[in-house]
Image (cartoon, rainbow, N blue to C red):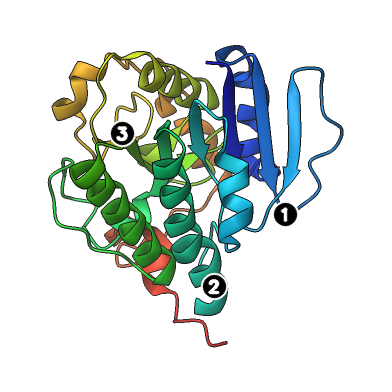
Amino acid sequence: MKRLLITGAAGGLGSVMRDKLAHLADTIRLSDMSDMGEAKSNEEIVTCDLGDAAAVEDLVKGCDGIVHFGGKSTEGPWSVINNANIQGVVNLYEAARKHGMPRIVFASSNHAIGFYRQDQVIDNTVYPRPDGLYGVSKVFGEAMANAYHDKFGQETAIVRIGSCFPEPRNHRMLSTWMSYDDFARMIERIFDVPKLGCPIIYGASANTATFWDNSKVAWLGWQPQDNSESYRAQVDANTPKPAPDAPDVLWQGGMFCADTIHEE
């Protein structure tokens, strides 16, 4: 690619993928509302509010691919989620439609299906069961991706990210963890395959314990190489096991399922 856009570049995943995806394009365009530091020789830095349609259109112009991490990444007031995760997604897809429909990696979330039980293994055809307003916003984003694919041919990989951190932080994450390297390898495949369509992919490493079945997207050729099992003894030693009826044990979305709706 000549230019790859990474939104949410100042966030946890954006700041990591800024380096890990640098080889995918001649120029990496980075966008966020927060400080992204100094631009490297192959980078462009653009401060952009995703709720501003004109600014997003300028942001997308000239890009061959988009990795969309931008938006509110946790539960919060609807006014914040609405601007960043609803209006922001509308603006992104309209801008993409107007500017050549670059392939998109849409960072969805396990919280789009958070109210499935942990004793279920689900694939990418299940009906969404969001566990809060944040999860609802991700279901909306998935719907936008599908609508723009069916109506215009816009290709998107919808990635229901589990828990993408250097290592799993608790017992639930032994099932949901995805390493940074496995995520980078996934994104490489997403931009490499000749025809993508609009698949849903569960973002988790090759964990021995799992809630999710990615067999219907095996054609992508993504083969995660890391396994949370290597951290199990560490998690057992450092993290008390929750009660059997705790949300972190019952539901795939964990404690998000117990959160209240945030008032303005």
Q: Tell me the residue at 56%/40% (across/down).
A: 60
Q: Residue furthest bottom?
A: 263
Q: Tell me the residue at 48%/28% (across/down).
A: 65
What mark, if any, has residue 76 been given in the picture? 2
Q: Tell me the residue at 33%/36% (across/down).
A: 156
Q: In the drawing, does residue 151 fall left or right of residue 27?
A: left
Badge 3: how crowded within 10 Å, few (<14), some, or many (20+)?
Answer: many
Badge 2: how crowded within 10 Å, few (<14), some, or many (20+)?
Answer: some
Q: Amino acid at mark 3?
A: Glu
What mark, if any, has residue 33 been given in the picture? 1
Q: Amino acid at mark 2?
A: Gly
Judging by the rendered image, the residue that carries numbered circle 3 is 155
Q: Viewer-nearest of labels 1 and 3?
A: 3
Q: Amino acid at mark 1?
A: Met
Q: Quadrant of residue 203?
A: top left
Q: Helix, strand or loop at disc 1?
A: loop
Q: Earlier in the sequence, mark 3 or mark 2?
A: 2
Q: Earlier in the sequence, mark 2 or mark 1?
A: 1
**Between 79 and 134, which is closer to the camera in this rendering?**
79
